[in-house]
Each structure stands twice: as C-alpha cells, then as structure tokens.
Image (cartoon, rainbow, N blue to C red):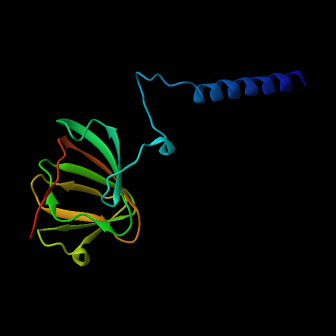
C-alpha cells in the first residue's frame, strides 16, 4: 500500500509540474501572440476588412496584414508597386488578370494556396459566395493603382 501511495503522489506531482509548465507565462521579449477574438479588424469600405499584424503598409518596410473579403465583393483591375506574398487561410479566393474586369472568368484559389502578386502587374480579386481570409506580406508602401480598360 505504501508503494501505491508513493506512486500516486509521484504521478500527482508530475502532473502538477507539467500543467504549471504549460500554463506558465511567456516572456514578451521572446514571443508575442494575438488570439483570434482579439484581432482588430477594420473595414476598408470596399467590401473587405483588414487587420494589420506587423509593420505599417502605408510606410516603407515589411508589413503583414490579414484581409477578409466579404461575400460578393471583388476589386477592380489594379496593381501594386511591389511584390505581395499571399496565403489563402479560409474560403475560396477568386483572381483574374488584365485590364478587363471579368468576374465570370476568374480562377478559384482554395484555402491553403500560396499566391505571389508581382509588382506593377494588373490583377483583380475577391470573394464570390463566401467569406475569404488572406494573410498578405509585402514591402510597403502598399499602394493600389486602379487601371481603366
């Protein structure tokens, strides 16, 4: 019985140590994180929302943003001055190229896909029947120049 008690106390001590290690505080100088319900989404006024995660897209330097396309919204033909690297996190993103806006001719890009938008190349994109969330990384300033056909 004495051995069983020591075994149980040892297991309890191990569980306590393990759970306190898991619940420990992270050093903010080493790691920073934002839980999904704390991400600060802001409307862009163009059928999408954006959350700036790192950097400042309006200034020179690296930036990381989350973009949420709301259903039935697409940009019009435009280009950016620099390359942008995009991961589709949720939904199906629809993309087209060229100066003629043709939503019916867009290509579906499902969640999990990686896309490069090359600087100064005309494209348009957005969501059709469902919400789309993108992770976009690029070099600022991240301006957008609309192109007329």
- Residue 25 image position (x, y, % from top left): 54, 24
Relative side of 119 to 45, left or right: left
Residue at the extreme front of the image, as rendered: 45
Relative side of 122 to 88, left or right: left
What residue is drawn where x is 28% and y is 48%?
136
- Residue 31 image position (x, y, % from top left): 42, 28
For residue 17, above or below residue 101: above
* Camera-side residue of 50 and 113: 50
* Camera-side residue of 103 and 20: 103
What residue is drawn where x is 13% and y is 47%?
82
- Residue 8 image position (x, y, % from top left): 80, 27
- Residue 131 image position (x, y, % from top left): 41, 63
Residue at the extreme bottom of the image, as rendered: 104
Q: Quadrant of residue 45?
A: bottom left
For residue 138, above or below residue 25: below
Question: How many marks do you count on the picture?
Answer: 0
What residue is drawn where x is 85% and y is 27%?
4
What residue is drawn where x is 72% and y is 23%?
13
Please state, as top left, top right, bottom left or bottom right, where the C terminus lies in the image: bottom left
Q: Quadrant of residue 1?
A: top right
Residue at the extreme right of the image, as rendered: 1
């Amino acid at each position: 019985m004495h051995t069983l008690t020591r075994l149980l106390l040892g297991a309890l001590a191990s569980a306590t140590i393990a759970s306190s290690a898991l619940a420990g505080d992270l050093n903010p100088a080493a790691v920073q994180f934002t839980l999904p319900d704390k991400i600060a989404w802001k409307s862009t006024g163009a059928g999408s929302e954006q959350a700036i995660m790192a950097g400042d897209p309006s200034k020179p330097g690296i930036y990381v943003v989350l973009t949420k396309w709301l259903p039935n919204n697409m940009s019009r033909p435009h280009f950016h001055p620099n390359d942008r690297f995009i991961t589709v996190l949720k939904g199906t993103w629809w993309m087209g190229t060229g100066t003629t806006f043709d939503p019916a001719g867009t290509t579906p890009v499902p969640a999990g896909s990686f896309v490069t938008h090359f600087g100064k190349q005309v494209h348009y994109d957005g969501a059709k029947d469902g919400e789309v969330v993108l992770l976009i990384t690029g070099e600022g300033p991240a301006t957008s120049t609309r192109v007329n056909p």
